[in-house]
Image: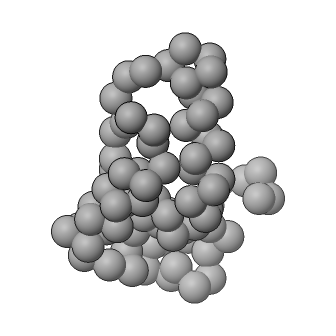
């Protein structure tokens, strides 16, 4: 948002300008539907790669949250 790198350590998440979150926890599902719709319109039909860096939940919970959100938003 500020156009700057965030240099605070991840354990100071409340003080940071931004933090990584699981898919569906930052942007609503409508945003992701539109995102993947534009990807398809531009010809992309490849893989989606997840990186779990949300420190508010376990890796398993973050992946499950992200996968559930993606399943609801990517047209098949």
Left or right? Give the position of 49 relative to 4.
Answer: left
Residue found at the far left of this picture: 60
- Quadrant showing the C terminus: top left
User: Residue 63 is drawn in which quadrant?
Assistant: bottom left
Numbered label tally = 0
Q: Is residue 52 visible?
A: no
- Quadrant showing the N terminus: bottom right
Q: Position of residue 67 (x, y in %)?
A: 32, 56
Comparing 9 with 47, the one in front is 47
Comparing 4 with 75, the one in front is 75
At x 45%, y 72%, the residue is 10
At x 61%, y 62%, the residue is 27
- In the depicted structure, whether residue 74 falls above or below residue 52: above
Left or right? Give the position of 74 relative to 4.
Answer: left
Residue found at the far right of this picture: 2
- In the depicted structure, whether residue 24 falls above or below residue 45: below
User: Residue 41 is drawn in which quadrant?
Assistant: top right
């Amino acid at each position: 948002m500020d156009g700057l790198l965030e240099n605070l350590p991840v354990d100071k998440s409340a003080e940071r300008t931004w933090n990584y979150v699981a898919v569906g926890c930052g942007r609503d599902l409508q945003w992701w539907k539109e995102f993947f719709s534009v990807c398809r319109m531009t010809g992309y039909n490849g893989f989606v790669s997840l990186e779990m860096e949300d420190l508010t939940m376990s890796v398993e919970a973050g992946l499950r949250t992200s996968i559930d959100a993606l399943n609801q938003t990517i047209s098949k």
